[in-house]
Image (tube, grey):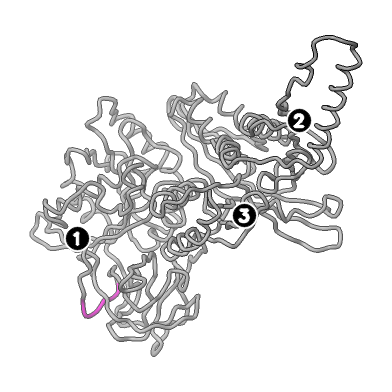
Amino acid sequence: MKHIRNFCIIAHIDHGKSTLADRLIQACGGVTQREFRDQMLDSMDIERERGITIKSNTVSLNYRASDGQDYLLNLIDTPGHVDFSHEVRRSLMACEGALIVVDASQGVEAQTVANLYLALEYDLELLPVINKIDLPAADVDRVREEIDEDLGLDPFAAVPVSAKTGVGIEDVLTGIVEQLPPPTGDSTAPLKALVFDAHFDKYRGVILQVRIMEGSLKSKETIHFMHSGREYTVDELGYNQFKLVPRDELSAGEVGYVVAGVKSVRDIEIGDTITLVERPASEPIPGYQEAKQVVFSSVYPMSTDQYPELTKALDKLAINDAALTYEKDSSAALGFGFRCGFLGLLHLDVIQERLQREFDLGLVISAPSVKYKLKLKDGTDIEVDNPSYWPDPMSIESATEPFIKASILTPEAYVGPVMELCREHRSESQTMNYLSAGRLEVVSEMPLGEVLFDFYGKLKMITRGYGSFDYDPIEYRKTDVVKVDILVNKEPVDTLAYLVHRDKARTRALHYCERLAKEIPRHQFKIPIQGVIGGNVIARSTIAPFRKDVTEKLYGGDVTRKKKLLEKQKKGKAKMKQFGRVNIPQKAFVSVLRADKD
């Protein structure tokens, strides 16, 4: 066991985790040069194109140290984005140490600090790595200062590397072997294994990634999942070395895969503890947490005959992604669709792009919303994330919405605009922490619903790309939420209804009305587009009608002839408005909701 090292790589998004993992894999001979490609541990096209890790991955590497001793290194790659912090949490539970990567030009950023606290929560040994030292803007001395002041780690233990060119990779491997501790655990105790990840294989079912904490596991033994209560028989187990390498047994301290005939990721819970039916453990591994959906949105096919394909596509994605939830939904304007729950806006964006690319579906996605908790006057408590189910305002006694603690790291020059941005998004408290020369952290408590739309984009714009943002959900607080309906020709369009704080209702309603007025084609009658709260109109735009010149054929005579024709036309228009139907094109929904999302 003393020759095993279980470690993960944590960092802010885009600080070079996947590239560093590539160099470590090459240095240990994990793949041949012919098989190698960039971002080896990122399996999806979308991950490669955007340069982000969405799904954590693992690989076992054999490494011979300078003293001639052979080591088994179990590397777990983790996502950097805040939406997938639950994946980072599970990966950290499976490790004893972590490489904390800091960009030599950007320095310590918000998610670096957030991931550091997560690692300390699980008592991990940390080895700082300063990456991208080959960049012209790299300032290693300044970053060492930040590692000391912001992270509280030994700045001189930090290994300077360039993951792109391969400089310093051998020093990192030496640091892993010498500074990160070996695993502990009793291989004779009852089995306790942590399921830290899983993916679906169409030929073999779900392949579980496990870390054996105590005891040992052999093929053909019957395992029991302690949280979900299910039982399966192990068909195969072994190491994941890009190919699955079968072994007879996995024992305490080892990381590997288990194939046990599980049909779907939904049948098990990631973070669960496996034990043996014959000799069970007394209690599961502590620290289990379910992934919580925080953003909800309705997804409709662009053309109604694509509904069966959308159903199949969501089923296939859910087999691999247990964090995605969905239930049937319908709209008078857009037909049948699904109400989906996501971990955050990036998760929504990734699922939307995968549906469009992998399944060739055209989609209309409603404005994202959060889950509100309502107390009704009859004493009942309900949770609502869909405007369609919002109760009568007269029956609501009080409403609460989720709040987050946002941590924003910014250069000192931009602190004024950043604090103003937080105030615009209904921030309730703001504190500043000076981290190092010219850099500070703004900590703000604000509603999650305010961050959903344009917050992140505006932050990047006002800080010229140097601001970084991370958040933690804290609690539900009292709020004044209203449901805004959009009426087209005095008919409500259910898909465009949204929930918003009363102070922001008019601004959003005006935006919707103006967008729709541009996108809906003119009809033979005047079309009013209104934003309403209950019976009060708070915004309006009007689409002017086509108008035929009915007096064109007149060439003289009394003015009353002209008036008579205009009066007849006026009556016709009124009748047409009464019976006429407004056709709202699909692109009108898309333009309103996309502009809102941007």
Label 1 sits on a secondary structure element that is: strand
Q: Nearer the viewer, residue 434 or 390?
A: 390
Residue corresponding to mark 3: 335
Q: Residue furthest left?
A: 68
Instruction: Give the label on residue 526, or none.
Output: 2
Q: Is residue 557 a member of the stretch shown in magenta?
A: no
Q: Say few, some or many: other residues with alpha carbon within 10 Å of mark 1 (under 14 / 14 to 19 / 20 or more).
A: many
Res. 290 visible in picture: yes
Separation (CA) of disc 2 from disc 3: 26 Å
Q: Which residues are magenta?
A: 247-252
Q: Residue 499: where, in percent of width, then height?
A: 70, 45
Label 2 sits on a secondary structure element that is: loop
Q: Residue at x 55, y 34 (%)?
A: 442
- Answer with mark 1 or mark 3, whichever residue precedes in sequence: 1
Label 3 sits on a secondary structure element that is: strand
Instruction: Give the label on residue 153, or none.
Output: none
Q: Is residue 213 above or below residue 18?
A: below
Q: Please tell me in which quadrant of the rendered image residue 279 appears.
A: bottom left
Q: Residue 28: where, in percent of width, then height?
A: 15, 55
What kind of residue is marked 3?
Answer: Gly
Residue corresponding to mark 1: 61
What kind of residue is marked 1?
Answer: Leu
199 relative position to 430: left or right: left
- Foreground label between 1 and 3: 3
Res. 423 visible in picture: no
